[in-house]
Amino acid sequence: MIRCITFSFLIGLCSNYIGQRINFNTQKNWSLNKKELLLNVGATQFLGDLGGSNPGGYDYSLRDWDWESIGFNVGVGYRYRFHPMFATTSMLSYVMVRGDDAHSEEFVRKARNLHFKSSMFELQQRLEVILFSVEKFSPTYNLPGQRGGKRRNQQYYIFGGVGLTYFNPKAQYTDGRWYALRPLMTEGQDKPYSPLAFTLPMGFGFRVGLGAEWRIGLEASYNTVFSDYLDDVSGVCGDPASYSNDPIAAYFVNPSDPAITIQVPSGSVGGYNWFGPGYQRGDDKQRDSYYRLNLVLVKNITYKDYGRQRIKTSKTKVNGTKIR
């Protein structure tokens, strides 16, 4: 699906290249779209220590896609276009990501039997580069501030930025309830890891006009998180005996499934002791990350300002004289 979207994006981008060279935004055109409100809603896919595709192990790759662990996100934002080719966007999003070793057919992951879901509240500031656009200022096109004619208002862009996220990984206990994992310190930490982390989003998208004030589009992004604890897994296994007073914490330290673990070839991963205290639980040399694929709805809030300006500056003839 991602490949199809990328291919469609490139085809659409190339088809507008010739027209773009002749009809690139003028000051008059792009200034009609300076201020916009955004609503994003779509799917997420986690890339980290838990879950993943079969056989797994594809770091930072779409090949590690796990359809059963798709999450969701929703966000609102404000976009300010300060140049025909550049805009800056502030986004506030709620993001849900998931991962589950039970979805993997790879022996070690499946036997490890860890899972999580994490609610994230993320603030991003990003810079957009508008690669190509078709925004001809003419009665022929239904642009913001214009009426009638054929609707044609398109943008193709790439973006990058920086963000700050708050995350809270949880897992489901045998009683069916979901418990926050950070306070349990499941890897034997001296103190809980920070629930805050910086992020680096980058991606691409396109938008098409729906009328004088609205646009709709698709946007895909890859988000690097400067933490390896988005899924509560990073280093080595803790010792369940150290959590004797907290059976819930002891369970989440090592919920490995003996029925599966006993089948793991001892020569390749060390047999059952692979999940013993001090053995590798995750990969602390790689940060967690996630994808987003969003439907984007855009409201132009520059339009009304421009309309009032036209009313004030354009007057009808009075006594045979046109005044402005």
Image (cartoon, rainbow, N blue to C red):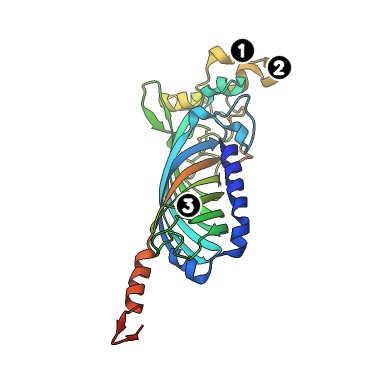
Distance CA(mark 1)–CA(mark 2)? 11 Å
How many C-alpha atoms fall within 10 Å of the one at disc 3: few (<14), some, or many (≥20)? many
Compare residues 48 and 39 and report the one nearer the observer: 39
Residue 267 is marked as 2
Give x and y (percent) for residue 28.
48, 70
Q: Which residue appears at 58% of the width and 46% of the height?
A: 9
Give the residue type that dot 1 points to. Answer: Gln
Give x and y (percent) for residue 305.
35, 69
Q: Which residue appears at 31% of the width and 79% of the height?
A: 316
Give x and y (percent) for residue 11.
61, 46
Q: Are marks 1 and 2 in contact (CB under 8 Å)?
A: no
**Residue 266 drawn above or below residue 82:** above
Compare residues 128 and 11 and report the one nearer the observer: 11
Q: Are marks 2 and 3 in contact (CB under 8 Å)?
A: no
Give the residue type that dot 3 points to. Answer: Val
Residue at the far right in the pictured view = 267
Q: Which residue is mark 3?
A: 208
Q: Secondary structure at mark 1?
A: loop
**Residue 7 drawn above or below residue 164:** above
Q: Is residue 166 visible?
A: yes
Q: Which residue is mark 1?
A: 263
Disc 3 or 1, which lies upstream in sequence?
3
How many C-alpha atoms fall within 10 Å of the one at disc 1: few (<14), some, or many (≥20)? few
How many C-alpha atoms fall within 10 Å of the one at disc 2: few (<14), some, or many (≥20)? few
Residue 72 is marked as none
Q: Secondary structure at mark 2?
A: helix
* Quarter of the rendering containing residue 312: bottom left
* Quarter of the rendering containing residue 283: top right
**Residue 172 drawn above or below residue 220:** above
Q: Are marks 3 and 1 in contact (CB under 8 Å)?
A: no
